[in-house]
């Protein structure tokens, strides 16, 4: 029987992402940018590995490269659907090259892809808490503008308002939040949280607000279930979590 | 003397190259003007140029400073697969549900992608039409509307104009233009 008290902080840290990432995912889905859920984590993983290679803090490297990718996506040459595919491939290729040339980086590479939630400590919890609160506040503030920009893209220009701060702000928020989640819960668990609950919400919800609640609460429940199953049966959390989301998703959808 | 809300002076508009014949137009508050003409003369391009989407290659576009413009294009907002209700859509643009036809007013709580094509089109149009604005630009607003929808639209456009709004309408629907507009301008082809 595992000592559940020992895993309280890791559980709470992951729960914060389980609540916040699906809401971010709803807006990524709105913008047809769900591939960002794979692209930014790959950029973050490459940044963390590169930082490790140069003996710098991996978290800083991951956040910096993901933010750079988010801001760089606004370059004229990178605009459009191809941007996330390019970021994903570049991040994956850089990660592979670093891990194959730096044996010590290989362990970090595995940790980034599989997640290292069970090792989350107080620092990670506080970082996740602050990041989640900031992300939720920003998304609440940006919500109607993001919806408007998608449905009536001319609205801002005709009112003499600039739309680029909204897009850039959202891109940076998505990049940083996904990078942080990658460092703690791993690439695939982050992807699952950004993709599956919003997909379910899009099928089931009657209103946008209702959709955000459905995505977030569904992910929170699936996360709690997966965390205890993985811990009790001593299995890899990321894989159990992805399977839980898929199975529950099929039932609810 | 107050200048018109919108004045076009010998405007030639286009996307990559000039696509319209020079156009002069003056639009006052409370006025509804129709732009007509055969396909390809650049009616939609003129609206796009006024809204800042297309390029003005020559001539001038003078708008009264600080006016708010609403534009309805022929592109349907991407609502399919989106859990968004009619009420939420109207709230986004600041449009009021008051004045909606009864066949739509009681469907505001439904998801937009679960409404019929005509109902969805009218709500998307209403969100533009009823948003706070001094100048409204409409591009083929009667597309996808049945007779009841067109009739209601005519009445609401007259109400908006009576409240001081200027409206410029592009339409190939001659009966609608005649019923709605105070005057019409027929655009000519570039090589005419």
Image (cartoon, coloured by chain):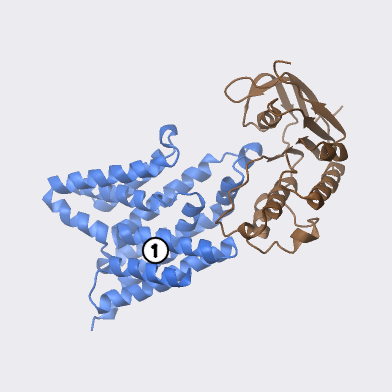
Chain colours: A blue, B brown
Against B192, residue A68 (above or below) is below
Name the residue: 29% across, 66% down.
A239
State the residue position of label 1: A17
Looking at the rendered structure, the number of numbered marks drawn on it comes to: 1
Q: Nearer the viewer, residue A146 or B138?
A: B138
Residue A164 appears left or right of B171: left
Q: Position of residue B20 (x, y in %)?
A: 69, 21
Which residue is pictured at 31% across the width and 47% down the height? Answer: A43
Spot occupied by residue A72 in the image (x, y as percentages of width and height): 39, 38
Residue A20: percent from left, percent from top:
44, 62
Observer-nearest of A104 and B108: B108
B116 on left or right of A105: right
Residue at (62%, 28%) from the top-left corner? B54
Q: Name the quarter where the N terminus of chain B is drawn.
A: top right
Chain at tag 1: A
Q: Which residue is most to the bottom? A: A1
Task: Pinpoint residue B108: horizontal percent, then vertical percent.
Answer: 70, 61
The image shows residue B100, relative to residue A253, as above or below, that is: above
Q: Can residue B3 be seen?
A: no
Q: Which of the 4 image quarters holds residue A220?
A: bottom left
Q: In the image shown, does A159 or B155 lie closer to the viewer?
A: B155
Which quadrant holds the C terminus of chain B?
A: top right
Query: Which residue is depicted at the point 23% across and 47% down?
Result: A95
Regarding mark 1 in the picture, which secondary structure is present there? helix
In the rendered view, does B119 fall on the left or right side of B148?
A: left
Q: Residues within 10 Å of mark 1 (few under 14, many from 20)?
A: many
Kindly tell me whether residue A80 is visible in this rendering: yes
Taking the view exactly as shown, the residue that stands out farthest to the top is: B191
């Amino acid at each position: 029987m595992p000592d559940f008290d020992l895993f309280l902080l890791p559980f709470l840290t992951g729960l914060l992402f389980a609540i916040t990432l699906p809401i971010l995912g709803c807006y990524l889905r709105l913008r047809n940018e769900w591939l960002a859920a794979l692209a930014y984590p790959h950029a973050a993983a490459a940044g963390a590995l590169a930082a490790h290679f140069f003996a710098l803090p991996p978290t800083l490297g991951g956040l910096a490269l993901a933010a750079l990718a988010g801001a760089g996506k606004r370059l004229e040459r990178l605009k459009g659907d191809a941007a996330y595919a390019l970021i994903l491939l570049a991040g994956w290729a850089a990660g592979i090259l670093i891990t194959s040339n730096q044996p010590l980086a290989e362990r970090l590479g595995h940790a980034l892809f599989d997640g290292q939630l069970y090792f989350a400590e107080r620092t990670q919890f506080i970082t996740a808490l602050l990041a989640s609160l900031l992300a939720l506040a920003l998304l609440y503030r940006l919500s109607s503008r993001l919806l408007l920009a998608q449905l009536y893209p001319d609205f801002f220009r005709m009112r003499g308002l600039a739309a680029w701060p909204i897009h850039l702000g959202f891109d940076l928020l998505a990049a940083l939040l996904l990078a942080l989640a990658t460092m703690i819960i791993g690439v695939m668990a982050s992807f699952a949280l950004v993709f599956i609950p919003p997909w379910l919400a899009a099928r089931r919800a009657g209103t946008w607000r209702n959709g955000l609640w459905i995505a977030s609460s569904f992910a929170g429940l699936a996360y709690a279930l997966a965390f205890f199953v993985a811990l009790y049966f001593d299995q890899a959390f990321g894989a159990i979590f992805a399977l839980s989301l898929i199975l529950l998703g099929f039932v609810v959808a | 003397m107050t200048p018109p809300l919108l004045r076009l002076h010998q405007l030639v508009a286009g996307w990559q190259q000039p696509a319209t014949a020079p156009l002069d137009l003056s639009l006052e508050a409370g006025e509804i003007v129709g732009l007509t003409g055969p396909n390809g003369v650049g009616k939609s391009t003129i609206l796009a140029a006024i809204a800042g989407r297309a390029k003005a290659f020559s001539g001038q576009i003078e708008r009264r400073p600080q006016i708010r413009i609403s534009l309805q294009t022929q592109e349907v907002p991407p609502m399919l697969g989106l859990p968004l209700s009619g009420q939420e859509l109207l709230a986004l643009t600041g449009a009021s549900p008051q004045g909606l036809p009864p066949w739509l007013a009681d469907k505001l709580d439904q998801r937009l992608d679960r409404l019929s094509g005509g109902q969805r089109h009218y709500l998307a149009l209403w969100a533009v039409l009823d948003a706070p604005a001094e100048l409204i630009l409409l591009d083929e607003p009667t597309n996808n509307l049945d007779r009841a929808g067109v009739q209601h639209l005519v009445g609401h456009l007259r109400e908006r104009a009576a409240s001081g709004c200027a409206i410029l309408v592009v339409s190939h629907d001659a009966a609608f233009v005649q019923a709605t507009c105070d005057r019409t301008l027929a655009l000519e082809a570039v090589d005419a």
